[in-house]
Image (cartoon, grey):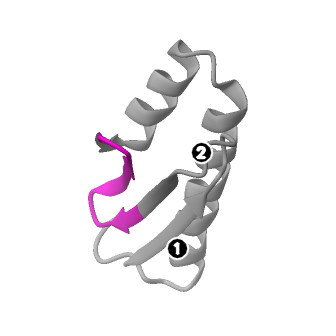
Amino acid sequence: HAFMCLSNVDGSGRQIQVFIHKEGILIRAGCFKGTLDEFCKKAQDEGKTRYAAVVKAAALALQQDCLDKNDTGGWE
């Protein structure tokens, strides 16, 4: 339903892809692929608290935008 790219969030220049779909939120970053919660836990475990917070905020904002536009594809 929605896709967003973020880059250089952690200062590395790497790209993060955020996908909003009917099952939830998928994050792809480097070799990581998983849910938003899995991504945030991994980042926090690595001491990247700002990285986790920024990606989570952006992903949830994108998901809320889909909801506000009633583009849910069956998830709510």
Check residue 53 in the rendering and tell me which mark sits there, or answer none: none
Residue 26 vs 1, above or below: the answer is: above
Q: Which structural element holds mark 1?
A: helix
| Quarter in which the C terminus is drawn | bottom left
Q: Main secondary structure of the magenta part?
A: strand
56 on left or right of 2: right
Q: Of the residues under marks 1 and 2, which one precedes in the sequence?
A: 2
31 on left or right of 15: left
Whole-percent x, y for residue 60 in the image: 58, 55
Which residue extends farthest front? Answer: 12
Residue 44 vs 14, above or below: the answer is: above
The residue that mark 1 highlights is 67
Location of residue 35 by image quarter: top left
Residue 35 vs 61, above or below: the answer is: above
The residue at the point 48 percent across, 83 percent down is 70
The residue at the point 64 percent across, 62 percent down is 61
Magenta-drawn stretch contains 40: no
Visible in this render: residue 76? no
The residue that mark 2 highlights is 56
Closer to us: 15 or 3? 15
| Quarter in which the N terminus is drawn | bottom left
